Image: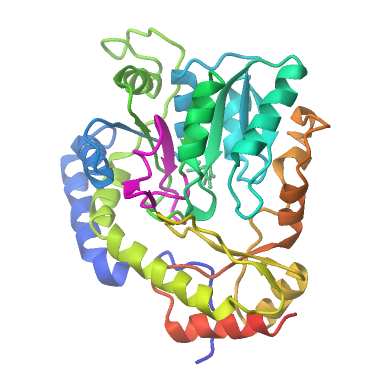
Amino acid sequence: MTGPIPMADLTAHRAVIGADIDRRMAAVLDHGRWIMGPEVTEFEAAAVAYIGDPTISAVACANGTDALVLAFAALGLQPGQAVICPSFTFVATAEAVATLGGIPIFAEVGEEEFNLSANGVRLAHKTATEAGHKVVGICSVDLFGAPAPLSELSPLAESLGCWLVSDGAQSFGAESGGVRTGALAEVTTTSFFPAKPLGCYGDGGMVFARDHAVADAMRSLRVHGKGSHKYDNVRVGQNSRLDTLQAAVLLAKLDHLDTELAGRRRVAARYDAGLSDAPGVLEQPLVRSGDSSAWAQYTVVHRDRDGLHAALHAAGIDSAIYYPRPLHRQPAYEHFHLMDADLGRTDRLSRHVLSLPMHPYLRDDQIDRVIETVRSVP
Ligand SMILES: *Cc1c(COP(=O)(O)O)cnc(C)c1O
């Protein structure tokens, strides 16, 4: 079969669960409690039930960037304090640090993966400390949906006297050792931007926290730092609530998430097999043993990335570069970079990564067309 193959299909799910979503939304249209309506609390409870750890609190908010800002603020990040994060990530990770006046310290990713490594964190911590920075936290990212090595990073953070936030914007539904994202770290943020594994019909986000005091602080911060009531302001906060309508969409879509994740895993497994000996492919995405990815993206490292991008385009197949310029080379962030921190792999990845079409409704014949085209580019 021919015809264009898009990166993602944000409406295909409507043929399967559109009626459930519309029914949920219609209930909101009838009750009219647009802000912090009952669906928001219901969705927070459903998200905790989904991750399967009732000791964790979920705090819904306006988007995945705010989720990071709320988490850092609740953990007490002060202006001038430093937070270690990857440079190979979406800008929001470092932006949330800088928004609060903090200093992002860019660390290297692991040799065979796209996520922060313990060695990268150790080196960044040493370099930053020697440069006079006070490092208070670490923010790892589950890039493309694969869990970062939290079983190494969490004890490392503790030994360095740092808190750890897991930016799970791309990994809701992923697992490590049978534990789902959200329950893998003390604090985990996520995003419900439409293109993420669990997407709503606009912007949405959430923070998971094991410490109830941290969760309570975030519930206050998301409503202007409210105290016991709205017009009692005990801290400087922001306006960052999840719309009731988005919570309604998410409640309906959450019921279907495992089916969609299975669809993404099917696509990834077919790419894995079909591309294992493709001549130009230097790396396929690594998922650590015992982990499962939410497969937000299927990203290969290719010898001739730009040639591959062009060949796919000519064949009517969309692909995307996440991310073409690492954060330590972005005009707004390069001044944070400590010169002697070597980010060689990050730089190489930015030149060689390409993400292929990935969504649960891709057909096998479409996947095979992508594979065939990738295999044709040395
Ligand atoms: C998407 C994303 C965010 C931000 O989420 P928004 O909901 O778009 O604000 C943060 N971090 C990472 C790694 C992301 O991919």
Q: Residue at x 16, y 45 (%)?
A: 30
**In the drawing, does residue 10 fall left or right of residue 113?**
left
**In the drawing, does residue 5 fall left or right of residue 44?**
right
The image shows residue 376 at horizontal and vertical percentages of: 69, 85
- Tell me if residue 315 can be seen: no
**In the drawing, does residue 102 fall left or right of residue 52?**
right
The total of numbered circles placed on residues is 0
The image shows residue 366 at horizontal and vertical percentages of: 49, 83
Residue 218 vs 13, above or below: the answer is above
In front of the other: 130 or 195:
130
Residue 367 vs 178, above or below: the answer is below
Q: Residue furthest bottom?
A: 1
Q: Residue at x 21, y 45 (%)?
A: 28
- Tell me if residue 128 can be seen: yes
The image shows residue 292 at horizontal and vertical percentages of: 41, 57
Residue 90 vs 255, above or below: the answer is above
Residue 233: say if magenta: no
Q: In the rendered structure, which segment of residues is drawn in magenta?
A: 169-195
Specify the quadrant that holds the C terminus: bottom right
Residue 176: say if magenta: yes
The image shows residue 43 at horizontal and vertical percentages of: 24, 41
